[in-house]
Amino acid sequence: MPELDDDNGTTGDEPTFQQRVLALGVPLGDGTQHMNLNALKELVGSDPEQTAATCRQCVHLARQRAGTWHGHAQLAQTLAALYEDEFDDDTLSVWVADELESAGLVVTEPEVGILDAESDRLISVDEVPDERPMLITVERQMLDSADIYPFVALFSRHEGERGPERLQQLRELRGRVAISFDIPPDDPREVWEVPEVRAYVFLLSERLPYLPYYFLPERLGTLFTWLSCLAPEDAWSGGGVRLDHPGVILQAARFLHCTRRFAEWLQDDPDEAARLVFGDWPEGFLEHLNVLVEELGDRLGDGF
């Protein structure tokens, strides 16, 4: 983890902003660290000016090509990305990218992860054994703050990351992700009836409409929860939602369209991806969605 020789952000004996940033590193035991993005995003949101100052300091140290220059550069990239996500302002991201490029610094993407509630440590994509399900719990803190950045960092599509290794990594996650939400067990509501969950799913579906590409194929699994959260209340029926409701069918068609587009971008088989996501659903459901996707086309969105 890089060391920053600047005492900005505090007075007296309180830790500096930069020290608070560095304290969020989680050692992996092999000499590397992951950053706790949930807490780091909250810190960035609390002080945009110190975030920018820390970015500038990191870039300055990276340009000196000191022994830990790569770590400084990665930290600057991460802070800038969180700043952009939090304030909808890409100024800092563009500046960091331009400065690193002008210095001739080639920087690999920083490793990111999601805090695992059971082990109290960050898990990365690389830690999940091949072909085994990847269970992600959206903690209460993430729900309350509508923090979708960990999903964006792990699963998003970026043109600049379209190298063969990144594409292969994302393809290997197809059909493996299950998502749960931190709702008290004594809460009598269905998960999709919780307003915070519905709001979180809406934000995530808008930012990553192709996320179902990754979902574990279960008829009443994550995709069902997704459709239920986005369904109008008049589609709810007892302990579930009506799959024949026009609003539910339209959302499912959108997911199918975006999943197919994403599979094509990943150089994957879109038909196979579609069958994996919707293959366990009622007979004829996928065929009906395919017809609807064909009819509506790009009116369902561009997929990205």
Image (cartoon, rainbow, N blue to C red):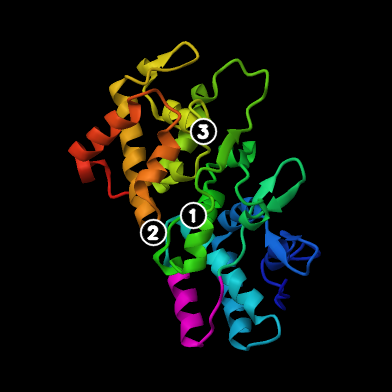
Name the magenta segment's main secondary structure: helix
Badge 1 marks a residue whose secondary structure is helix
User: Are there few (<14), some (14-19), or many (20+) residues within 10 Å of tag 2?
Assistant: few
Percent coordinates x, y for residue 36 in the rendering: 67, 55
- Mark 2 and mark 1 in contact? Answer it, CB < 8 Å: yes
Bounds of the magenta segment: 92-108
Viewer can see residue 151: yes
Relative to 221, residue 123 above or below: below
Image-based side of 201 in relation to 135, left or right: left
| Alpha carbon separation for disc pair 3 and 1 | 18 Å
Q: Which residue is mark 2?
A: 267
Relative to the observer, which residue lies in front, 206 or 47?
A: 206
Query: The disc labelled 3 sits on which kind of residue?
Result: Thr
Viewer can see residue 53: no
Relative to 162, residue 193 above or below: above
Q: Splitting the image into 4 quarters, where does residue 29 fall?
A: bottom right
Disc number for residue 222: 3
| Alpha carbon separation for disc pair 2 and 3 | 24 Å
Query: The disc labelled 1 sits on which kind of residue?
Result: Arg
Query: The disc labelled 2 sits on which kind of residue?
Result: Gln
User: Going from the N terminus, do you reach mark 2 or mark 3 first?
Assistant: 3
Image-based side of 294 in relation to 72, left or right: left
